[in-house]
Amino acid sequence: MPASIPVRAVDVLLGWKSWRSGAVTLGSGTSVAWRRLRRVTGNRLQIGGGSIVHANIIFEDQGGDVRIGDRSYLGLSTLICVRSVAIGDDVLVSWGATIVDHDSHSLEWDLRRNDVSNWARKHKDWSHVPSAPVVIGDKVWIGFNVTILKGVTIGEGAVVAACSVVTRDVPPRALVAGNPARIIRVLGADDEVEPSQ
């Protein structure tokens, strides 16, 4: 795994055109050590201050927007964006998570028959592939090997248990688990950790 990259070195990693164009912005004190960042040109990546990002960030097409808030942590996970993924402040994303805002392929065979040959030519027609924004609210904790699919909003303070597959919205402060993820319970004041005296 590469070492953390200071902001001034992002220019070398992403290419000066992406950096100078404003396609990538990093807040103060943010540490990035992604394993792969693909297709930055024509997309926007914004990471707030004090965050740590160790994820694969993949833009599948042009016009994508990935926003990660302040003091958030993304472990060795994968974020795949066609249009929009927004992650709030104080979010924890463990290793092995996959967050994706699209279905990858059309359900119709005639519309996906050329996907592989088009990939070989570094092209894909995304117009027939369903996509919808993913929104992860502030103070969310996402466990290891979680999958979050297109169109999902996870409410503030929710917790997604390890190995869950999230296919629909999660209310604020809900603990969800399973495949598909279901509400186990709603977290209350009793779940707060009191500071030691």
Image (spheres, rainbow, N blue to C red):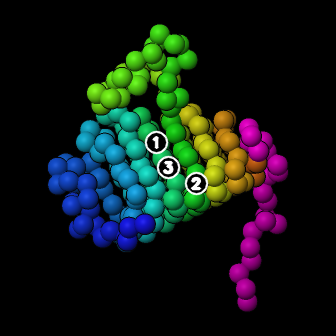
Residues 172 and 85: in front is 85
- Badge 2 local density, few (<14 within 10 Å), some, or many (20+)? some
The residue that appears at 24% across and 66% down in the rendered structure is 9
Give the left or right position of residue 154, taking residue 191 as reference. left
Label 1 – label 2 distance at C-alpha: 13 Å
Going from N to C along the chain, the mark reached first, 3 or 2, is 3
Q: Is residue 60 above or below residue 87?
A: above
Q: Which mark is residue 80?
A: 1
Amino acid at pointer 3: Thr
Image quadrant in which the N terminus is located: bottom left
- Kind of residue at disc 2: Gly
Tell which residue pokes out farthest to the top in this image: 110
- Comes first in the chain, label 1 or label 2: 1
Contact between labelled residues 3 and 1, with CB atoms less than 8 Å apart: yes
Q: Quadrant of residue 27?
A: bottom left
Please report the residue visible at 39 percent of the width from the left and 64 percent of the height from the top.
33
Q: Given contact means CB atoms under 8 Å apart, are the residues at marks 1 and 2 in contact?
A: no
Is residue 15 shown left or right of residue 190? left
Distance Cα–Cα, label 3 vs label 2:
7 Å
Badge 1: residue crowd in 10 Å (few <14, some 14–19, many ≥20): many
Which marked residue is nearer to the observer: mark 1 or mark 2? Answer: 2
Q: Which residues are magenta?
A: 178-197
Quadrant of image for the C terminus: bottom right
Numbered disc 1: secondary structure: strand
Which residue is tagged 2?
A: 96
Q: Residue at x 53, y 29 (%)?
A: 103
Identify the secondary structure beneath mark 2.
loop
Q: Is residue 133 above or below residue 185?
A: above
Tell me where residue 162 appears, x and y as whole percent: 70, 54
Residue 112 vs 20, above or below: the answer is above
Q: Residue at x 40, y 59 (%)?
A: 34
Q: Amino acid at mark 1?
A: Ile
